[in-house]
Amino acid sequence: MPASLADLLNQTLLFTASPKPRLVANALPIASLAGRAKIASGESPADRKIWEFEQNGLDGVRNVSVRQRTMNDMRMSVCREVKWGDVKVTYQGRTLGLPLTDRFLLRTYYLPEGTIPESNTGYWQLPMKLDQSFQRLFGFQLQAGQLQPLSDADLQSRDLLAAPSPVAFNRARNGTQQGVPPLRVLVCMALGCAKERNDFEPGGVLGAARLMPHVMLAANLPVESMEATVRLAREPTTPHTRHDNEEMTLGISSGFFTDRNDTLLPIPYWNNLFDYYWIDPPVGSEVKVVRRDRPLPRERVGLIKEVDIRSSRGSSWIAGYKPRLIKKAPRQGEFDNIHMAPKMKLPASVLAKIPSNWPRETTMAPFCVHDCFHVHWRWGRGRVAGNPKWVRGWGADAPYQEIGAPMVPRNQDVTVKMLSACSMAYTAKIHAPVVGNWQIVMHHGGAYALSYTAAADAMSLLNDVLTSDLRGEGGAGGRWANFYWHLRYALVEHSLRALDPTDKLVEWLEVPDTHAERLSWDAGGFRAARDL
Amino acid sequence: MRKRYVFATLGALIMLALELISMPFLISSGGVATFVKYVLYGPWTLGTALLMSAKDDLGVLLSPGGMSPLPYGLTVGVLVFNWGCYAALGFLLGWKLAGSPRNSSKPA
């Protein structure tokens, strides 16, 4: 078991990279990309430095942004603010707050660039190229009931977090003070910024830049629990409401999604990929996203319903909704991911012709093509489609082991609270952590979409071929809006359109086209599905 | 001769249907997706890889289409070419399956 500072540091994200990070003063030497030449031909996106941020106290960063190569290297805001905090440890029945302040700060490490090799062991196994990243190490010691900073001599000790003798271990667990070494806790708050790679979602469609704000905690004695929170806030508005003939809403909003397990084909319709979702959750909503109190698989029929489209003799109609089965994996909670992005608007020429009560904008999912930051803590289990390593969840003590499992260690409960329409607090409670082992909060991180492969374009083309009804005038605009709209909603054109494709006949006979959300539920069903 | 055309057209339509059904696997991963990408979408996979290589390695100027590294028109072109290849393959298979005109014209 690692006990010295060097052993512990070698397990952190930055020290897994090559070259190793360098020790710096509290003020980070953050490099700016202003004035840099635009992307050069022949330059691989995977090698390109893209991340910028500003220090915001010891426990936060602000103005976290990436350079968007497909938008002429434009600077796009990813997070207005990232803040680490509310670190707590409960020991012998007493909860201690561990402030991330100058008094307890031991070390700050900064890595301008580094490479993490692919591995099958350790906490950081995915190959990636890190852009500028940093981590701060804080140390706490409980002496005479008071929290004290760790001294330099303690820090250099080979037994910094050595496991106590069995006798001392039992005494500590039973609440006895005598003969028990003082409680020591190390907290490593880190921001890992990765360069673009196609290994975020199962299909590798998105070129995504991972942002990995996380907290690592370790104690030398058997504490009851630990807790830490990472807050992520996006800018409330996007700087870019028009992109590639598409129009976005100004406001950035959020949506929770629950991935469907055991899907057969990877058709991106929402009823195929999701069990249910919650678009624009109200401020203050708190959801349990990883649950230790759900250790077994569960399934129920009828909580959620799916649109029932019937066809006969060349015409189709929506016959209503039919019940469907929800399957949840062990520890799966209410939702599996959150997307924070502007919505995509249907073109004005389309809005002018569809009924006023029809949805006029749509959420970009399952993958998004503009200004989208998403955090996934679990991915659905594909039956035929692949489950690559990067979407697998934690096993007994290591990440990327189990298909369909949460990407969160097994001894954690995770809640997500909406602080505003575009900010959230991610809180993990760690139960009975193993003495001397790092406990990692938000190991999975999040990602900002920078590009998509030509295959995504091909899918939108297929949608266009099958459904051109909501394209803009002349077909120039609204290709992606049309695509996303149809992923969420089913549209059935009236069969009279076969005779007269214009609106004249259907309007004269008052037989309009119909549409329906592909998934439906009532309040009780939604509550029960979330709680399943 | 009519039978050959019917079989050939059917062959082309079946291949196109297979192409459409398997298309979602282009945005997926795993064994089936690999099969689809390299067997059912071979010209597409090769074509887009060549275009990407021309852009990234040879510096050929191809303006990105939105967040896609390739222009949408080019992507559509490669896709339609791919479908055309498999439709032609289906057509030929159907044609062959219906038998040669010499055989079919022989008296029983």
Image (cartoon, grey):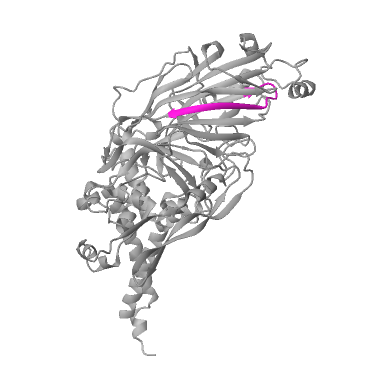
In the depicted view, which residue is nearer to us: A413 or A525? A525
Residue A208 horizontal/vertical position (percent): 41, 37
Would residue B63 appear left or right of A171 to someone viewing this image? Answer: left
Magenta-drawn stretch contains A240: no
Residue A223: in magenta span:
yes
Taking the image as drawn, is residue A111 in sight? Answer: no
Report the side of A259 relative to A143 (left or right). left
Q: In the displayed structure, does residue A78 sit left or right of residue A528?
A: left
Query: Foreground: A11 or A215?
Result: A215
Picture coordinates of residue A385, whole percent (x, y):
49, 52
Quadrant of the snapshot with the N terminus of chain A: top right
Q: Residue B9's spot in the image, x, y percent?
A: 33, 71
Residue A295 seen in render = yes
Measuring 29% from the left and 41% from the top, which residue is drawn there?
B66
Bounds of the magenta segment: A218-232
In the rendered view, would you say A297 is above or below A180?
below
In the foreground, A297 or A459: A297
Q: How many marks?
A: 0
Quadrant position of residue A29: top left
Question: Most extreme residue toward the right, as rendered?
Answer: A167
Within the image, what quadrant is residue A279 found in?
A: top left
Query: Which residue is at the far bottom?
Result: B108
Direction from residue A301 to residue A316 in the image, left or right: left
In x, y percent, where is residue A408? 57, 36
Magenta: predominant secondary structure element?
strand
